[in-house]
């Protein structure tokens, strides 16, 4: 077992002018982006006091240190870096350590900073992967994440090929809860929802991960016009470079669930981006084959894969678990005024909109924990 959480081969490539370094690195070696500061001791957010001074506010408890973890193995690789499985040497707890080489390009650095902000602000939902702490040291950003030992839905699909409807309904509920939290509590568009960004574990939990290209909506219109993410799962309005909002994630979600059901990506293989663009924008949307699936599932996929954004249902309309949950939920009773519902009759109306596919298998008491453990190949078996 190798000690330490950093890959020694990852180093910062310095720009030619020192002035450009000072734009994102302090003299003490702290990575900075606006109010965000990250160094070997963790992440801080700079807060302005009423007197006009500045004070450092700790976002996450400083209980974790990179010196306290041992690297077990690399469990993932991507364009931005690698993901390592690490073990805390005092408690034995496993974590996933996302290691990103800091790129000096302004757009890339902004994207990394955005991921850090979003990851550390989404720790209050059981359907979103927990981010415990972030570090910057020697040209490398390290993000300590909750370890999901079942891997991703993409990994699981490689093993099982297809997921039966009862289990798919249970998975859908958890993903939708995560989307409700992101969209209506945190005002975040994920923008890269795909099987590899939905993680599972042996407890039967399903969680949304990877906020590298997500966007925080600050404007009242709730729309974005930047073009980032994985092309294949983009909604028609996004791949056509039009403004988009939370509902674009619902299209991606529908494609993911249809892929899980059929075992194959809903669109045929394309030789070029423009061919994919034409299929998504100009051709009819994919659908679940009615001869293979229930009427309820076909209807659910159709609700998600509407080409016009206004025709798609929001996550909270696809899944609302009941009036009592609404009464106790910050999502619907938030102090900022968004999503506030004072009429009990309106709550009952929303509750009645839950899609029948999501409840049709409730009597079966589906056990996702057993299903994931028996059918998949957990990464914890090393």
Image (cartoon, rainbow, N blue to C red):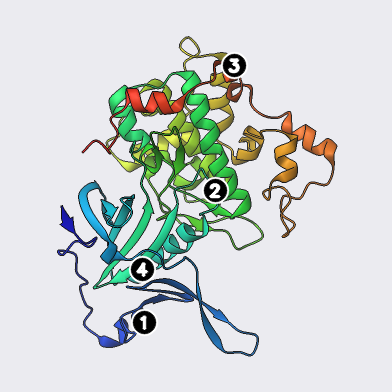
Q: Is residue 163 above or below residue 378?
A: above
Image mark for residue 23? 1
Q: Which residue is mark 4?
A: 109
Residue 73 placement (x, y as % from top left): 20, 48
Determine which residue is flagged by label 2: 125
Q: Is residue 113 above or below residue 348?
A: below
Name the N-terminal-most of marks 4 and 3. Answer: 4
Can residue 234 be seen from the camera position used here?
no
- The Cα atoms of the two marked residues, 3 and 1, are separated by 58 Å
Mark 2 vs 4, N-terminal side: 4
Q: Classify mark 3: helix, strand or loop.
A: helix
Q: Badge 3, how many Cα within 10 Å: few under 14, some, many 20+?
A: few
Residue in the image at 33% along x and 54% along y: 91
- Which is more N-terminal, label 2 or label 1? 1
Looking at the picture, does residue 354 appear above or below residue 42?
above
Q: Which residue is mark 3?
A: 363
* Between discs 3 and 1, the one toward the N terminus: 1
**Alpha-carbon distance for marks 4 and 3?**
49 Å
Query: Which of these two is toward me, 226 or 112?
Result: 112
């Amino acid at each position: 077992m190798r000690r330490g959480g950093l890959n020694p081969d990852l180093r910062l490539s310095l720009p030619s002018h020192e002035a450009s370094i000072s734009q994102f690195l302090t003299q003490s070696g702290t990575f900075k982006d606006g109010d965000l500061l990250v160094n070997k001791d963790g992440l801080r957010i700079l807060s302005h006091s009423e007197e006009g001074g500045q004070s450092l506010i700790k976002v996450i408890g400083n209980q974790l240190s990179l010196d306290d973890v041992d690297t077990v193995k690399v469990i993932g690789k991507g364009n931005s870096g690698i993901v390592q499985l690490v073990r805390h040497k005092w408690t034995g707890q496993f974590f996933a350590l996302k290691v990103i080489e800091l790129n000096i390009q302004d757009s890339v650095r902004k994207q990394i900073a955005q991921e850090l902000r979003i990851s550390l602000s989404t720790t209050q939902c059981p359907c979103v992967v927990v981010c415990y702490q972030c570090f910057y040291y020697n040209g490398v950003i390290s993000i300590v994440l909750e370890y999901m030992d079942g891997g991703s839905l993409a990994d699981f699909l490689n093993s099982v090929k297809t997921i039966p409807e009862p289990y798919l309904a249970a998975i859908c509920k958890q993903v939708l809860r995560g989307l409700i939290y992101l969209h209506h509590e945190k005002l975040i568009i994920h923008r890269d929802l795909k099987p590899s960004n939905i993680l599972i574990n042996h407890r039967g939990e399903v969680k949304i991960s990877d906020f590298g290209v997500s966007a925080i909506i600050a404007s009242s219109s709730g729309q974005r016009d930047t073009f980032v993410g994985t092309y294949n799962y983009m909604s028609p309005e996004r791949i056509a470079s039009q403004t988009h909002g939370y509902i674009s994630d619902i299209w991606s979600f529908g494609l993911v669930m249809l892929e899980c059901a059929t075992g194959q990506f809903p669109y045929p293989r394309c030789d070029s981006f423009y061919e994919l663009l034409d299929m998504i924008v100009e051709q009819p949307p994919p659908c679940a084959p009615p001869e293979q699936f229930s009427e309820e599932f076909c209807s659910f996929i159709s609700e998600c894969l509407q080409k016009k954004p206004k025709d798609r249902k929001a996550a909270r309309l696809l899944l609302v678990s009941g009036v009592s949950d609404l009464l106790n939920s910050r999502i619907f009773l938030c102090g900022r005024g968004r999503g506030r519902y004072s009429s009990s009759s309106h709550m009952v109306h929303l509750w009645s909109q839950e899609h029948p596919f999501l409840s049709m298998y409730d009597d079966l008491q589906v056990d996702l924990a057993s299903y994931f453990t028996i059918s998949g190949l957990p990464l914890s078996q090393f």
